[in-house]
Image (cartoon, helix red, strand yellow):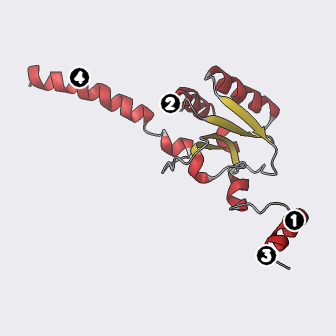
């Protein structure tokens, strides 16, 4: 039997082989290299993370959002509303992931973006500290120039 015939039979019996099936399962059917932002199910329950997502969704106008289908329906609805307000496409993915540390929501691209940090807490943890530093730097510069004590 030729290799081509064997491959055809294998595809018929077992389906088309997938690349990195464990990674695709963890990232709701896509690859890690395509993810901009990842929220776990537990992180989705925190209002501070919801506000971070709402603030930064506009940074990714060409992205789409994948939502874990096992997330509480009320929580799902609130995130769908946020995504719709940002004019992004979304898909609710049926999956077997339902632990608190599993992926609950992903902001993804259709091609590789290779973001170093995708966790929402790590990626946007410096929002408040950066804003306060910017304010103090501006005020501090003028203060230092004209109000030396």
Q: Residues within 10 Å of mark 1 (few under 14, many from 20)?
A: few
- Mark 3 vs mark 1: in front: 3
Q: Quadrant of the C terminus?
A: top left
Q: Which element type, helix, strand or loop, lies under badge 1?
A: helix
- Residue wearing tag 2: 59
Residue 59, position in %: x, y? Answer: 50, 30
Above or below, 128 relative to 18: above
Q: Which element type, helix, strand or loop, lies under badge 4?
A: helix
The quarter holding residue 143 reads: top left
- Residue wearing tag 4: 139
Q: CA distance from mark 1 to mark 2?
A: 41 Å
- Residue wearing tag 1: 14
- Residue wearing tag 3: 3
Towards the viewer: 138 or 12: 12
- Mark 1 vs mark 2: in front: 1
Q: Quadrant of the N terminus?
A: bottom right
């Amino acid at each position: 039997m030729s290799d081509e015939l064997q491959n055809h039979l294998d595809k018929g019996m077992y389906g088309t082989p997938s690349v990195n099936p464990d990674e695709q399962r963890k990232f709701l059917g896509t690859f890690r290299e395509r993810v901009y932002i990842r929220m776990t199910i537990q992180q989705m329950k925190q209002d501070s993370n919801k506000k971070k997502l709402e603030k930064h969704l506009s940074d990714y106008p060409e992205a789409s959002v994948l939502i874990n289908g096992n997330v509480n329906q009320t929580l799902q609805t609130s995130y769908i509303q946020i995504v719709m307000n940002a004019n992004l496409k979304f898909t609710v993915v049926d999956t077997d992931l339902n632990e608190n540390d599993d992926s609950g929501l992903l902001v993804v691209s259709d091609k590789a973006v290779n973001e170093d940090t995708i966790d929402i807490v790590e990626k946007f943890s410096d929002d408040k500290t950066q804003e306060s530093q910017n304010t103090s730097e501006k005020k501090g510069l003028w203060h230092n120039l004209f109000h030396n004590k």
